[in-house]
Amino acid sequence: METTLVIIKPSSVQRGLIGLITNRFEQKGLIITGMKMMQLTEPLLKEHYAHLVDRPFFPILLRSMMATPVIVLAIKGVDAVAVVRGMTGVTKARNAAPGTIRGDFGMSGQENIVHASDSPENAVVELARFFKPEEIFEYMPLVTPALYEPDELKL
Ligand code: UDP
Ligand code: MG
C-alpha cells in the first residue's frame, strides 16, 4: 500500500470543513495513519511550494496557507496517491468535477480546499516534511478484508 499527504487548507479550517473532508477519505475506505493540526511557516511553504516561489501569486499563497493552522493527514491505501488526487479534483476548484472535494466545496483556484501529493515520489518527501516518523501509525483496521480482495492487499 501507498501513503499520501493531504493538507486541509486554512480556508477549509475557517469554513468548518475539517470533518466533512476527513469523512470523504474514511468513506472511501482509505486509512488515516496520521493526523494533526499545525501552523505552517514561510520556510516550510517555500520548500513545499518550491515550484511556485517565482510566480506572482506566491506571496498571496503564503499568506493564505499561514492564515490559520492546517490539518495534515497521512492517508494509506492501494494506489492511495492517485486515488486521493482523483478525489481532490483539478487545481481550479470551480472547474473541478462534481463529486470531487474541490468540485463539491470550492470555487477558487487559490482557495481550493486541500493539498494532495501528486506522485508516489513526492508523497514520500512530503510526508517526511510534515510528519515525524512516530506520528504515522502502521495499523490495519479490522474492516480491511471487507474493503479489499486478498490479492489486492499484496499490492
Ligand atoms: N495556485 C494558485 N494559482 C495558480 C496555481 C496554483 O493560487 O495559478 C495555488 C493553489 O492553491 C494550488 C497551489 O498553488 O493548490 C499549488 O499549485 P499546484 O500547481 O501544485 O496545484 P495542486 O497540486 O494543488 O492542484
Ligand atoms: Mg501540487
Image (cartoon, helix red, strand yellow):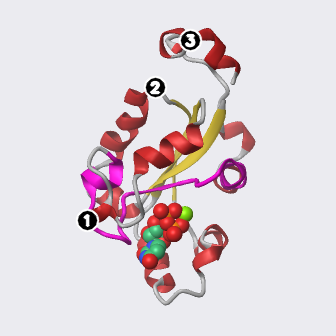
Q: Is residue 54 left or right of residue 26?
A: right
Across and down, in percent, residue 81 comes to: 58, 44
| Three-letter amino acid code at the position of disc 1 | Met
Image position of 24 with respect to 129: above or below: above
Label 1: which residue?
Answer: 107
- Can you tell which quarter of the image residue 9 is in? bottom left
- Can you tell which quarter of the image residue 125 is in? bottom right
Across and down, in percent, residue 121 comes to: 72, 51
Q: Whole-Å distance between the Cαs marked 1 and 2?
A: 27 Å
| Three-letter amino acid code at the position of disc 3 | Glu
Q: In this rendering, does residue 65 appear at all? A: no
Say the numbered circle drawn on residue 29.
2
Q: Residue at x 63, y 75 (%)?
A: 51
Q: Quadrant of the C terminus?
A: top right
- Between 153 and 64, the one lying in front of the other is 153
Q: Quadrant of the N terminus?
A: top right
Q: Earlier in the sequence, mark 1 or mark 2?
A: 2
Q: Could you say whether the residue bearing mark 2 is in a helix, strand or loop?
A: loop
Mark 3 closeness class: few <14, some 14–19, many ≥20 residues within 10 Å? few
Q: Is residue 101 magenta?
A: yes
Q: Earlier in the sequence, mark 3 or mark 2?
A: 2
Say the numbered circle drawn on residue 80.
none
Q: Is residue 21 left or right of residue 150?
A: left
Which quarter holds ligand 2? bottom right
Q: Residue at x 49, y 90 (%)?
A: 56
Label 3: which residue?
Answer: 149
| Boundaries of the magenta span | 100-126
Across and down, in percent, residue 141 comes to: 55, 16
Q: Could you say whether the residue bearing mark 1 is in a helix, strand or loop?
A: loop
Q: Is residue 82 left or right of residue 154?
A: left
